[in-house]
Amino acid sequence: MQLDQIFSPSVQHTLDVIGIFVFAISGALLAVRKNFDVFGMAVLAEVTALGGGLFRDLIIGAVPPAAFTDLGFFVTPLLATVVVFFLHPHVERIQAAVLVFDAAGLGLFCVTGTTKAYSHGLGLTASATLGLATAVGGGVLRDVLANEVPSLLRWDRDLYAVPAIVGATMVVLCIRFDALTSVTSGLAAATAFVLRLLAMKFHWRAPRAWNRRSTVMEE
């Protein structure tokens, strides 16, 4: 079994499209909150959904990137933009459900990003790092374009990168001990997914500097 194809091709493609759609929804919703026009909504949707995978593919030399060779990957964020454009009040009301699917996309992409990086010759540490970048890179680009501090860097946001790091680390450990299968890959994705859900439920956050005594006002 090829490392970058841990599920059957049809299942892999379906999961990728679902993850892309949900990430694109979050980008389009942020554009609405920022009062962007429809073009701005589409840009944020595309960047959020495809940015992490695009960055990974360029780093590992998988060119042209999948975002430009699979029409479904490119069109899906546009469909998400249309949905948010017309139905954003309704989408906002099911934000909790969107976050659940976003967590699922996080788990999936940290695993597929890691395996694809390793299959292109990167070492274990670099592969895990690119797995993380695949999962969270689009969100970072989204926030930068929207002139916000990336959620990934804010102490007052629930853990997001840590679950992806855990999932990617599980994958490289499985690779190291020759135990990577569709089952163990699915377990890694599920672990990242559950950790993200628990972080949202219990508001788990990463610690700040030890013995921090800054007099600067919190923003």
Image (cartoon, helix red, strand yellow):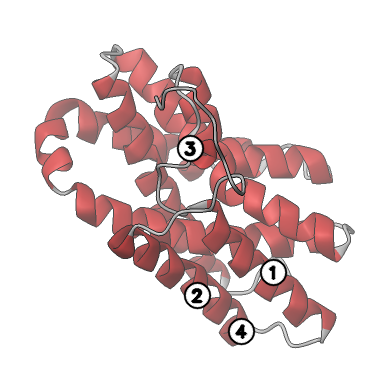
Disc with the residue nearer the chain's start (3 vs 1): 3
- Identify residue for label 1: 169
**Decide: marks 4, 3 in contact (CB < 8 A)?**
no
Disc with the residue nearer the chain's start (1 vs 2): 1
Disc 4 from disc 3: Cα separation:
31 Å
Asked whether the viewer can see residue 27, the reply is: yes
Which quarter of the image is occupied by the N terminus?
Answer: bottom right
Q: Which residue is drawn at the image coordinates 52% and 22% (left, top)?
A: 144
Which circle marks residue 191 in the picture?
Answer: 2
- Identify residue for label 4: 184
- In the image, what residue type sits under mark 2? Thr
Label 2 CA crowd tier, 10 Å (few <14, some 14–19, many 20+):
some
- Identify residue for label 3: 154
For marks 1 and 4, give the one nearer the viewer: 1
Residue situated in front as seen by the camera: 198 or 192 = 198
- In the image, what residue type sits under mark 1? Thr
Q: Position of residue 180 (x, y in %)?
A: 71, 82
Q: Position of residue 153 (x, y in %)?
A: 54, 37
Q: Position of residue 13 (x, y in %)?
A: 51, 60
- Residue 68, compared with residue 100, is above or below; it is above
Left or right of 120? Residue 54 is: left
Disc 2 from disc 3: Cα separation:
23 Å
